[in-house]
Image (cartoon, rainbow, N blue to C red):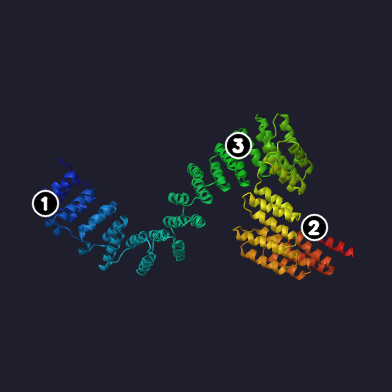
Amino acid sequence: MGTDPINGTQLDFLSEKGKALLTRIVNHPLSTLHDLLDSERSDLFEADFVGLLRGLDALGGWDKALFLFQWVASDSTIRASKLDNQSIEVIARVLGRESQHSIASKLFDAIPLKHYSLDVRAYTTIIHAYSRTGRFDRAIEVFTQLKSRGLSPTLVTYNVVLDVYGKMGRSHSKILGLLDEMRSRGLEFDDFTCSTVIAACGREGLCEEALEFFKGLESQGYVAGIVTYNSLLNVFGKAGKYAEALSVLKEMEAKNCPPDAFTYNELAATHLPNAVTYTTVISAYGRAGKEDTALDLFERMKRSGCVPNVCTYNAILALLGKKSRADDMLEILHDMKANGCAPTRVTWNTMLAVFAEMKNCGFEPGRDTFNTLISAYGRCGAGNRSLKVYEEMTRAGFSPCVTTYNALLNALARKGDYEAAEAVVRDMKSKGFKANDTSYSLLLHCYAKGGYMRGIEAIQADVYDRHIFPSWVILRSLLLANFKCRSLKGMERAFEELKNGYKPDLVIFNSMLSIYARNRMYDRAHGILSAILQNGLQPDLVTHNSLMDMYTRGGEPRKAEEVLRGLKKSGGRPDVVSYNTVINAYCKQGLMQEAMRVFGEMTGEGIRPCIITYNTFVAGYTSHGMFEEAGEVVDYMMENGCRPNELTYKMVIDGYCKADQYEDALEFMAKIREMDPEFDEAALQKLAVRVWENIRST
């Protein structure tokens, strides 16, 4: 005997006979339900058909409700009396709730809907079913039928139709028309409305229209939710507008709308494969405490061929540091080295903060950790702390290795403490270790930083006598050390040696170009430029700036500006040094209007002038006796938040003295304190002495 499914269920809308029939249907297998319905035809003819459908739905039997509806619709003798507006509305609601869109679209194809007057909810469900099955024309047809019945579409209805138009494509004008219609009916857009319209714009590549729609809503007080933001993010992502996509993420955070999994997946998807995007998403995962997910994304990034930059590595180190995962942090540092990505101060500060915290918590560092700390302190400019860590390492019973010594040399090289560096090398050799290329390279940099040419020459002699193997690293370091000490002869020798078996990189070529430019050796400079191109390299910003400097020193401002134009034409972006160099070229020749023209172009490009820019103008004006203009530059500096320095005032005073205008020089001296109350008193006294010395010498 079947169970009573009605027990405990509120079905008061059915008669007792109806409830009994419902029980029989519920207890009967679906596979043979057709036979039961045929046998119960007379009872079904008299029964409350809508009530049975509602009862089956209430008992969780949507499939049997559908079967019953289809049985009635296929029976011509019972269909006319049972198939009405209410029964269609019930089955539409049932199928819509169960997301049976394919079944619904086929069912309503078989029913002549134009003969019925349904409620808005039923029409909306049917439109949605057609939309989900790609029957867009049919969906629009039903929407038109809804309005022809005099019914007012709800916000949900309009949202569904907006989605239909969006999926149809080439329907932007129709979408705009529908939005106007919604406004005229006083309907307020919700997140679904906004996300649907934005997604529709995205499908047609209408990024500007999507953003305009979004900003327009915001201006009217609309507060976007996660769904809308994700739609906008998707639009920019698919269009390859990475900066705009990232700005959406930043706005979400600023508006306290936390990103969800879809947000991160959109950013991490293949249509946003740049390092900036990956780094942003990795950082977001880190803030959310999802370190392993961030690491998985990091590995996926590398597998996809997208090269991590230093910001990516720093983001990984930061999230690992929060969990005190020291071993993983060291692996990331090794990965950076293997990929040729140089750690920055941020990298090392992150490492130091983590290891210091771990040590306070009882963490016992190993030799690799000590080596990392020595290197980290050195790179952060704390060379003395590096030496203390080295002493702590030896007290802990760890023997130094070549890596340890090189970390110490790196710290000392940044200070230029070559005497201490030489002591490290002696200790290294006394313990049986052989200095490697890195050791000699660091020692050379230490000598260069300290301006100790004798040390550079000593290593140089050992290299050229083949006591030290002339590797690419050592020859390159020799060239750069000589460059830092302005030794043209030493650079040329290293350059010739390097070309015998090695291929110079752009840094080497730029260094040679720069030294030739400073010495106004035009032919050799142009030879280097040709060599850059012949070696398949592209001149960069440094290359162009060196050429500008060469022409500036040679008194050829037009040629300097030609180089600037060439840089911009090639797609490069000049920096403040580029513009300062060309401005200086014109100022030296007294062509102040031309200099001002370049200055205007510089600020128009959004490049902020620096103290060197202003001092260049002051020098140009004073050297040509244009003291009023020089004073205006000083006033302009003060007004624009760039305080003149001692050199600024010195140039004005020297200009007056050179022109034998001593009273004007003294008057200017008196005004300095008034113009710049915070100017250093000792510096002011030095300037006063300078004026009086010039007066006495006349």
Q: Residue at x 66, y 48 (%)?
A: 507
* Of residues 188 and 335, the one drawn nearer to the viewer in this rendering: 335
Where, quadrant-wise, is the N terminus in this rendering? top left
Disc 1 residue type (three-letter): Arg
- Local SS, label 2: helix
Tag nearer the camera, 1 or 3: 1
Q: Residue at x 80, y 64 (%)?
A: 653
Q: Where does label 3 land, which residue?
A: 359
Where, quadrant-wise, is the C terminus in this rendering? bottom right
Q: Where does label 2 land, which residue?
A: 682
Give the percent coordinates (x, y) of residue 183.
37, 68
Report if residue 10 is visible in the image. no
* Of residues 695 and 27, the one drawn nearer to the viewer in this rendering: 695
Disc 2 residue type (three-letter): Ala
Disc 3 residue type (three-letter): Lys
**Residue ranking furthest to the left:** 42
Q: Residue 5 carries which label?
A: none
Q: Earlier in the sequence, mark 1 or mark 3?
A: 1
Disc 2 packing (10 Å; few <14; some 14–19; many ≥20): few
